[in-house]
Image (cartoon, helix red, strand yellow):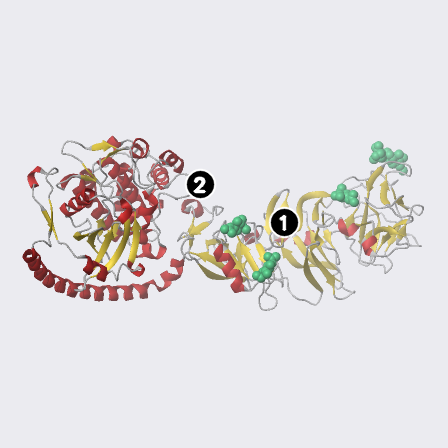
Amino acid sequence: MKISYKDFPLLFILTFVMSIQKISNATDTITTTKILRDGETMISSDGSFELGFFSPENSKNRYVGMWYKKITVTTVVWVANREVPLTNTSGVFKVVDPGLLVLLNDTNGGIIWSSNTSRHVKNPVAKLLDSGNLVVKDANDDDPGNFLWESFNYPTDTFLPGMKYGWNYKTGLEVYLSSWKSKDDPSSGDFTYHFDPTGYPQHLLKRGSVVQFKSGPWNGLRFSGTPNLRKNTFYKYRVVLNKNEAYYTYELLDRSIISRVTLSESGVSQRLIWVDRTQRWEVYLTNPTDNCDIYRLCGAYGSCNIAKSPVCECLDRFLPKDPEVWKRADWSNGCVRRTPLNCQNEDVFLKYSGIKLPDTQYSLFNESMTLEECKVLCLKNCSCTAYTDLDISKGGSGCLLWFEDLANIKLVPEGQYIYIRMASSELELKRKKREILVLSLSLSMGMVLLGLSLMLYLRKRKKSNHRLREGGRQGYKFTDDHRDENHNKSIELPLLDLYTITKSTDNFSINNKLGEGGFGPVYKGLLEDGQEIAVKRLSRNSFQGLDEFKNEVICIAKLQHRNLVKLLGCCIQGEEKMLIYEYMPNRSLDLFLFDPMGSALLDWHKRFQIINGIARGLLYLHQDSRLRIIHRDLKASNILLDSDMNPKISDFGMARSFGGNETGANTSRVVGTYGYMSPEYAVDGIFSVKSDVFSFGVLLLEIVSGKRNRGFSHRDHNHNLLGHAWMLYKEGRSLELIDDYLGISGYLSEVLRSIHIGLLCVQQSPEDRPSMSSVVLMFGNEGVLPQARQPGFFTERDLFTAESSSSTNAASSINQMTITLMEAR
Ligand SMILES: *[C@@H]1O[C@H](CO)[C@@H](O)[C@H](O)[C@H]1NC(C)=O
Ligand SMILES: *[C@@H]1O[C@H](CO)[C@@H](O)[C@H](O)[C@H]1NC(C)=O
Ligand SMILES: *[C@@H]1O[C@H](CO)[C@@H](O)[C@H](O)[C@H]1NC(C)=O
Ligand SMILES: *[C@@H]1O[C@H](CO)[C@@H](O)[C@H](O)[C@H]1NC(C)=O
Ligand SMILES: *[C@@H]1O[C@H](CO)[C@@H](O)[C@H](O)[C@H]1NC(C)=O
């Protein structure tokens, strides 16, 4: 909407050429017999208002209307037959039984206009009150509660003092303003102005059915976006809100003051005050005031500042949703949090001040809550986006909550504050610098300690190895004679005794439990020499025979690579079977990647290092290890991180070894984790090295984006992360996939290449996916990559077909070191 200040003088000086014959014996009442003809008028008892027939400027049509009696510039404040004009002066205005006010086009002609009522009275009259309210009532009953009809309930474009502008829930009647079509035509124009209590009350300007302006919610003192509405010497105003009615009203403080609120034909609401000296209506307040008042001009989380150019900016900690469009001054798409919310973690609220509060259409409120209770309530509900005081008039009280994207925000003088929901990392980021310092300090101290304990450990191990050899029976020999012809010799694993393990884990104390795997719990242990270990304890009821256990041990013990977690030893004593691994101080990748604080610590350099480490570990499994192994459950929670954040693949419980010529196999029991499973494996149970490549691709895209594939959602489509990445890739917008935290400047081509490789790894058909050796090569050189095609399982719905999958998923996804055994085939 354009508001031109040039128009104002015309807007508020409403002059009409009228032919009104004054009659000497003015009356304020008409009845069934005492009728009003064209040329006659009614005058309120104190002489404030006059009612009669008139013609607007440049029009010959006749209307029944009301105007101020005491001022020289004739100003019509109400029109009866605004939609149906009379064409000549033979109209008659009168009361008819059982209590209707009617306008006839001739003494005996048809009804042009009529009031309505649901009640009957014996002696109906119509009276023009001093307030400018024309009422139909019983002649002897002055109780306003018994009025049959009143013009204050059907205003045209003028809001007079004492009117209840808003809603009466008992009658279902809304009192609102409706502009004239033009100065010549009082029929309903384009604009209406409402008091809208939906959510929490605010003024609302509509053009037709389109909202043009919202004033911001009532805050006890004024409407949040109308800073100029304040205590004054002319009038007082208030909002009434209860179960029967919701309205805004005002009254004049001095009977000598004449003031009104109008809605102009061009859609501007103004408070005008009559000034005797100038003999003019002077503008006191205007709504909307400037372009920043255009409804939702800056979109969600955008803020309008009329003093700036361009006027729209994202709120602090928000970024344009679509930067290209935003740059072209189309701000309607608004902004998004630079750190997405993650309701699972504790969110925080940040205070934003000096604003016109956002649209409250979908808000909830509570008048008796404190701000603290309000915060707690908002925090509980993931869809609650913001809160603030409901009423700021007495230092702040009550609770106002928002449940959707915040829009219609504008910077205003003496604006309010609001607490907007943020990912907790936003609070942390401010302190990040300090924390990183502390972290690196403690890390380096940790490294010193680690070094010391390693030295101690190595010295002790020398001794214990010696003892092992002496004891003879204490070492456990596994003979692996089927699997590997060339290495047909026994593997010697250090055997730890149950007592040592029990002691190291504080008798398997719950405090030391790291997680729960499909086959039993995992504990952290501390050996006497100071070495930290992770102990996987096989449940007694896991029905795993010694053969399978051996299998597992052989499988893992034979694998040695810096990107695979290392088995230190085992413990077999009676019913107890345990595997002892090196302990990974940084636990698993998912804890960093999908946590806003954690992910802030993973810059691009770290992420790229992790991706490469995983690729090398997997290549080793697939190709270079003596066993050649398909992992089958590659996922973020199975990637452990050592103190230097080097990735180590863990959990070979579902791993399968395959022969020299085989590259894959088939299984009737599909095990793995939703979101990482390749289509051919989830659906047909066919697994191969290429199903691991698929999982790797998913993991890669998760690492780049910082988002989970499963559970990923986007407002524009219902694809998962793979689908999202694919869509962006197709449109050449791959960079938008990237986790906001990554400081990627300088690495753009590396990032884009990684996304591209990730997409190649998740291709629908296994043949289209590169092998891990190709993947490692792709990362290593700058050669041209093949074009990626549509990935497999790119929408969540595809996964319904995979519902038959193993029940171990849930369990194995919560622990960091799942302990599982090779399946017997
Ligand atoms: C006004 O119009 C009505 C209806 O057309 C007609 O009956 C009546 O005579 C007219 N009155 C005058 C004074 O022209
Ligand atoms: C007067 O009212 C009657 C009944 O509504 C209608 O038929 C007639 O056309 C009207 N005359 C004028 C001039 O509006
Ligand atoms: C009176 O008329 C208005 C508009 O036509 C309508 O909304 C309202 O319900 C009517 N009231 C009664 C009491 O009939
Ligand atoms: C408002 O909050 C108070 C205190 O928590 C509670 O007792 C009351 O029921 C709430 N009122 C409404 C309407 O929810
Ligand atoms: C959160 O609030 C919204 C809006 O009031 C409501 O529809 C939804 O049920 C609430 N969710 C919870 C978990 O309370």
Q: Which residue is mark 1?
A: 205
Q: Secondary structure at mark 2?
A: loop
Q: Earlier in the sequence, mark 2 or mark 1?
A: 1
Whether disc 1's CB lies below 8 Å from ligand 3 is answered: no
- Mark yes or no: residue 404 visible: no
Q: Position of residue 387 (x, y in %)?
A: 52, 58
Quadrant for the C terminus in the image? top left
Whether disc 2's CB lies below 8 Å from ligand 5 is answered: no
Residue at the image position 33 percent from the left and 53 percent from the top: 741
Tell me: 291 left or right of 762: right
Disc 2 crowd rating (10 Å Cα; few below 14, some 14-19, many 20+) is few
Kind of residue indicated by mark 1: Leu
Farthest residue to the front: give it.
574
Q: Position of residue 339 (x, y in %)?
A: 39, 53
Residue at the image position 19 percent from the left and 48 percent from the top: 564
Q: Which residue is mark 2?
A: 716
Q: CA distance from mark 2 to mark 1?
A: 30 Å
- Mark yes or no: residue 806 visible: yes
Q: Position of residue 55 (x, y in %)?
A: 80, 45
Kind of residue indicated by mark 2: Asp
Q: Position of residue 609 (x, y in %)?
A: 22, 50
Residue at the image position 27 percent from the left and 38 percent from the top: 694
